[in-house]
Image (cartoon, grey):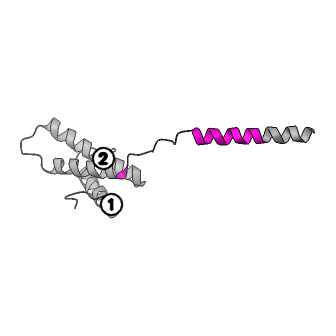
Amino acid sequence: MGWLLVAGAVVLVVLTTVRSLLQRPPPPPEHRPIELIATDARRLGHRFRSLPRGVSFAKFEAIRRAYDDVLAEGCAALDLPELLGVLPAGDELDAERVRVEQLLCRWGLEIDDAA
């Protein structure tokens, strides 16, 4: 009779565990959907490349950083290496941006005007 009590307790624990797993909401995604990242990359890339002459440094820097951030986000979503947040502004950062654009394009992230 004691084994019946133990078996009943085991069944109760299993059913409780299964029910709690089924009722638990799925974990939030680690990254935004890649389609949204690609859309933002196209939009910000276009803005970055078509800034008018004489635009203020603050506006240029804000758009550049936003574009670099979305490129880095695309790399993170695809688990690709990038140095956009590490390099100071200048030729090395510009070269890294081109490298990342090309890398993302090879992985299927369409970015307008990417070299």
Q: Is residue 62 left or right of residue 80?
A: left
Quadrant where the image shows the N terminus: top right
The residue type indicated by label 2 comes to: Val
Q: From the image, tell me which residue sits under label 2.
A: 70
- Residue at coordinates 23% horizontally, 52% vertically from top-left? 42
> Which range is magenta?
11-34
- Residue at coordinates 72% horizontally, 42% vertically from top-left? 14
Occupied quadrant, residue 105 = bottom left
- Vertical relation: 46 (above or below) 10: below
Ranked by sequence position, the earlier of labels 1 and 2 is 2
For residue 59: magenta? no
For residue 30: magenta? yes
**Of the pair 87 and 73, the residue shown nearer to us:** 73
Q: Is residue 3 left or right of residue 86?
A: right
- Residue 88: horizontal and vertical position, in percent? 27, 44
Q: Residue furthest top?
A: 58
Occupied quadrant, residue 102 = bottom left
Q: From the image, tell me which residue sits under label 1.
A: 103
- Residue at coordinates 12% horizontally, 50% vertically from top-left? 50
